[in-house]
Amino acid sequence: MIEELIELAQAAPDARSFEAAILRRLQARIGFEVGFFSVRGAESYPSAVGLERALLELAVERSDTYARELLPVKRAALSARGVAVDTEVLGETRVRQQAYHRELASRVNGRHSLLAYLPWRGDTLGMLMLGRTGGAFSARAREQVEACLPALGAARAAFGLPFHAKPLTAPKPPGLLQRLGLGSRVYAEAATPSGRIVVRDRGEYREMVALDRDGAELVWTRARRSDPRSSGWPYVDLFHVAAARARRRERALFIGAGGAVALQQFAAVYPGIELDLVEREAGVIELARAFFGLDTLPRLRVTIDDGAAFVARAAPESWDIALVDAFDARSAEQPFLEAPFLASLARALRPNAALALNWIGALDAPALEALVQRLERCFEGVQLLPVVRAGALDPRALRNVVIVALRRSAIRSP
């Protein structure tokens, strides 16, 4: 069976084809009516056989509920050799009472489900579920699946894996208000030339907050504690417009770290992408590593440097995408909006690369019009993507505006 897995991996053009081929081969060798192959980080896109589209969509939609019900089966599998059968762990009566059986398995006349967890580098890469409508899985069938799991995990990993974001950890038990989702709790702080940076939990979010010498605060970043890829701020999601417009998505430059929400998103959405992060303040990086999971990101290079100086020294045509999220609303100086930086950045981007830049202000501000004119000297197809909430259409209102543009094939001098 292991030799067959290697042959299938070599013959498959992509991960989805490989997963489908594995299910077909196991169906022929083991015997089952319904099969399901899910990989961590891509749970919304499983491979399956024997399930109609509506049932597959239901399985994805209700996956959290089904996973909780099957947790005893998963524990039994991981305490053995990676395989367990639901009716053997829970008993047939209890299985029939579970939502996953009533809503899903019973609709395809399922009776027994074998769960197998793929190992990879000391962790669980994904899960196979094989369902039968007739007799139970024999010991021989379980042994065959167990024997191939290590090779199957390695073969699937060879196609590249989606990034899986872990919840943000809390170093100490929260107080009563925090357990109730109220109030805020400060974890740490770092000194900067202009004041302090504080990390705190407030409600369901973790925030990085800049405090000036007068005590005024500016929330730099926020990340959902249960999923650090989510910030609740729409402008972060607009950065993906640049990724969509870029010809390639192999390497991206990020100027400004904050809580690394955009980095988390790009690592998850574009598997295999290389990430270069430049941040001026070493304290910000230390806090991002300790409290926002920065070091969990794959293919990440961090540089402590002034972003403008770093880009000026960069080799030509280094990046496919550049994201600039370093607007300082407290400062009159904005070097990342000036012509010299924009020209250096255009030179450092590959042809048909894309830029996304976060700007804060009013849509009718003369400063925004001037910025667009400077951008059009080095970039083309400049788009303004303002964050506009319902009932807040006033062009004089302060808002985030994400500016997206493509690098010109011929760059004008600044």
Image: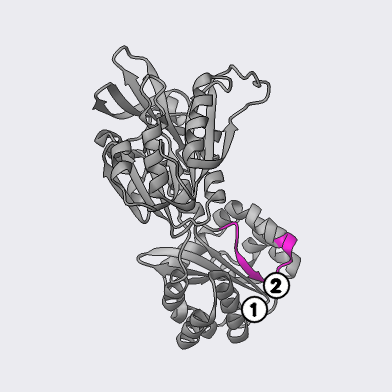
The mark nearer the N terminus, 2 or 1, is 1
**Residue beneath label 1, please?**
32
Q: Quadrant of residue 52?
A: bottom right
Q: Are marks 2 and 1 in contact (CB under 8 Å)?
A: yes
Q: Is residue 46 magenta?
A: yes
Residue at screen point 50% across, 42% down: 379
> What quarter of the picture does the C terminus occupy?
top left
Q: Amino acid at mark 2?
A: Gly
Q: Is residue 390 positioned above or below 128 on the image?
A: above
SS class, disc 2: loop
Residue at screen point 60% across, 60% down: 45
Residue at screen point 54% across, 42% down: 380
Farthest top residue in view: 214
Mark 2 Cα-neighbour bin, 10 Å: few <14, some 14–19, many ≥20: some
Q: Amino acid at mark 1?
A: Phe
Q: Position of residue 206 (x, y in %)?
A: 42, 33
**Residue beneath label 2, please?**
50
Q: Quadrant of residue 160?
A: bottom left
Q: Position of residue 193 (x, y in %)?
A: 24, 23
Q: Is residue 79 positioned above or below 261 on the image?
A: below
Q: Is residue 358 positioned above or below 41 on the image?
A: above
Q: Is residue 50 magenta?
A: yes
Near-viewer residue (68 or 291): 291
Near-viewer residue (307 or 67): 307
SS class, disc 1: loop
Q: Is residue 322 positioned above or below 32 on the image?
A: above
Residue 171 visible? The answer is: no
Q: Which residues are magenta?
A: 43-55
